[in-house]
Image (cartoon, rainbow, N blue to C red):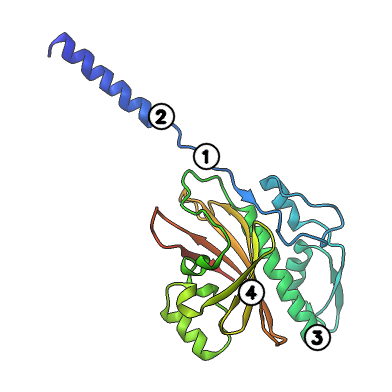
Amino acid sequence: MTKSTFLLSGAMLLSVAACANTEQPSIAPSYSETNKTEGRFVDPVSLDSRADVEALASGKWFFSYPLINDSGKSTEIASCEQLKQAQAQGFKGEDFSMQGAIEALELICNTWQAMAKLEASHTSWINFTHGKEVAKELPAEFALAISNDTVERVAQSEHWSDVTTIKKVEPVSEDQAVYYDTDGSIQRLTLMAQGDYNGDGIEDAIFYMENGVDGGSYSSVNTYIVTRLQQGAPITLLAKW
């Protein structure tokens, strides 16, 4: 090996080592200002960091909720932690209406818990903006499925728009909008947070959906966690509850 060849090989090795040691860019988790904490906590809430989101678990609610167990013993809860502990001990809502409210509280507590688990990511392929086109990208599970026919359509479809047609979108904020479809569904969709949920380094998104129907009393809530693995790939569902 000549001296010049040796020097060139050494330079190439240094270059490869430098590339291997280069850290990938880090994208910190972000949290929406519209995060379902409004009017719920005694102390003001601002989600500026992961620690702020983690603190929601023990944060004291402005209102307390009565629960009862099968033995007739009663208790009250006023935080996500207290709710989790009471449910583990067999407590539930005093009646059907209260149990529905407790289940909605459990869902939002689980959503905040998922937000608190978000890590920094190094790649993001999700650039979300509310509008009718959203239904062509989000998974079919975002459609409100009450009837057996709609449930079947969701199971056979890839996108929200394959199940129903969005006829109107009313923006509420940058992160929230109300979607009206041709089947009479009224759905308030909120982008709650973005960050790496499953540890693959790719940014995921957490959505919260409040469902209703035009002229009816039906209501429900759902949380969705979605991802896009690369540019041009479909948005896929990671979790739903």
Residue for badge 3: 95
- In the displayed structure, 142 sits above or below 49; it is below
Q: Which residue is mark 4?
A: 187
Q: Is residue 123 above or below residue 8?
A: below
Give residue 192's quadrant in the image: bottom right
Residue at position x 69%, y 85% in the image: 218
Amino acid of disc 3 = Asp
Q: How far apart, in angstroms, are the residues tagged by discs 4 and 2?
A: 47 Å
Depth-wise, is mark 3 or mark 4 nearer the camera? 4
Q: Residue at x 55, y 75 (%)?
A: 166
Q: Note whether 42 is above or below 183 in the view shown.
A: above
Marks 4, 1: nearer the viewer: 4
- Tag 3–tag 1 contact (CB < 8 Å): no
How far is mark 4 from mark 1, CA to CA?
Answer: 33 Å
Within 10 Å of disc 3 (Cα), the crowding (few <14, some 14-19, many 20+) is few
User: Helix, strand, or loop for circle 3?
Assistant: loop
